[in-house]
Image (spheres, grey):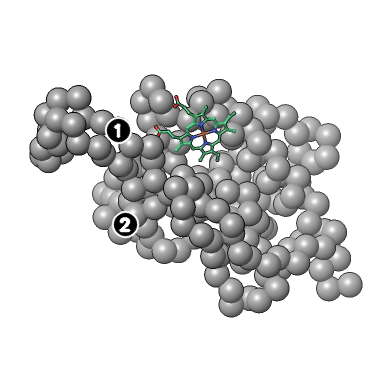
Amino acid sequence: MLTAAFFHIAQHPNVLQNLRLELDPLMPNQITGHKLAELPYLNAVIKETLRFCPPALLLLPRWAMDDVEIGGCIIPKHTSVIVPNWSIFRDARYFTQPDAFIPERWLDPTFRLEQTFGKSAHLPFSTGIHSCIGQTYGLAQLEMRLTLAYWVSAFDAVLVDPNSSFEFEEHFVLSKAHCRIRAYPRDMTYV
Ligand code: HEM
């Protein structure tokens, strides 16, 4: 997730700029987990990264104990069901411009979220009693917020190949990301 976030921040200088507008007033001594949780743009970047490059491409299978109807679809008893996060997150029925990295979609109510059911289709940690415990107790979010906040504050970054895209291997989880980023101490990019 963090590699994907670093890549897309390097690819979108406006995203870096917006993150710094939020983070600079807190740096270096006022960073706490609670304060980071209240930063709308930082959390929008995290949500968008989890949508665009979900670490769990598929959710763990569920087993139907009985015949069940979900959304008009009959699932027969003893069927194994898998939720394909990747496909849902890139589906234009749920997210407008699904193949674009746009953190603002999580902030702007006019982004047709209501019409596209984007919020309820976004389940990178799954849902229910076996959903990710890292989310339930906030550890995953804390790690992502802290690491991104310090990265963005400390480094300017550019893509080694500006035309490259974020590539990875598709297993059950997103793995072996291939991307090349050149990072510099902040404000020294062209020194
Ligand atoms: C961005 C980071 C993370 C993502 C996207 C993520 C996502 C997921 C997903 C999709 C599941 C499967 C849930 C299901 O199929 O219902 C899961 C399960 C789980 N995750 Fe995470 N996870 C992340 C970080 C963490 C961290 C940091 C921890 C530990 C502190 C953690 C602990 C667990 C555990 C223990 C389960 C199994 C829960 C169960 O079966 O009851 N995860 N996670």
The type of residue carrying mark 2 is Asp
Q: Find residue 94 and report its horizontal and vertical position in percent.
A: 30, 51
Q: Which residue is mark 1?
A: 62
Question: What is the C-alpha distance between the residues marked 2 and 1?
Answer: 22 Å
Kindly indicate whether the residue at mark 1 contacts the one at mark 2 (C-beta within 8 angstroms): no
Any atom of ligand 1 within 8 Å of the CB at mark 1?
yes
**Residue at x 82%, y 68% (from the top left corner):** 189
Q: Position of residue 47 (x, y in %)?
A: 50, 45
Where is residue 188? Give x, y as percent: 86, 65
Mark 1 Cα within 10 Å, few/some/many (few <14, many 20+)? few
Q: Is residue 36 visible?
A: yes
| Crowding at mark 2 (Cα within 10 Å: few <14, some 14-19, many 20+) | some
What residue do we see at 82% from left, 58% from top?
Answer: 186
Nearest the eye: 175 or 190: 175
Q: Secondary structure at mark 2?
A: loop
Residue shown at 83%/34% (left/top)? 29
Query: From this viewpoint, is residue 18 visible?
Result: no
Q: Amino acid at mark 1?
A: Arg
Furthest residue toward front: 78
The one nearer the camera, 94 or 137, is 137
Determine whether the beta carbon of the residue marked 2 sits less than 8 angstroms from the nearest atom of ligand 1. Answer: no
Relative vertical location of residue 21 with respect to residue 9 in this rendering, above or below: above
Specify which label sits upstream in the sequence, 2 or 1: 1
Residue 91 as seen in the image, left or right of residue 172? left
| Mark closer to the observer (2, 1) | 1
The residue positioned farthest toward the right in the image shown? 191
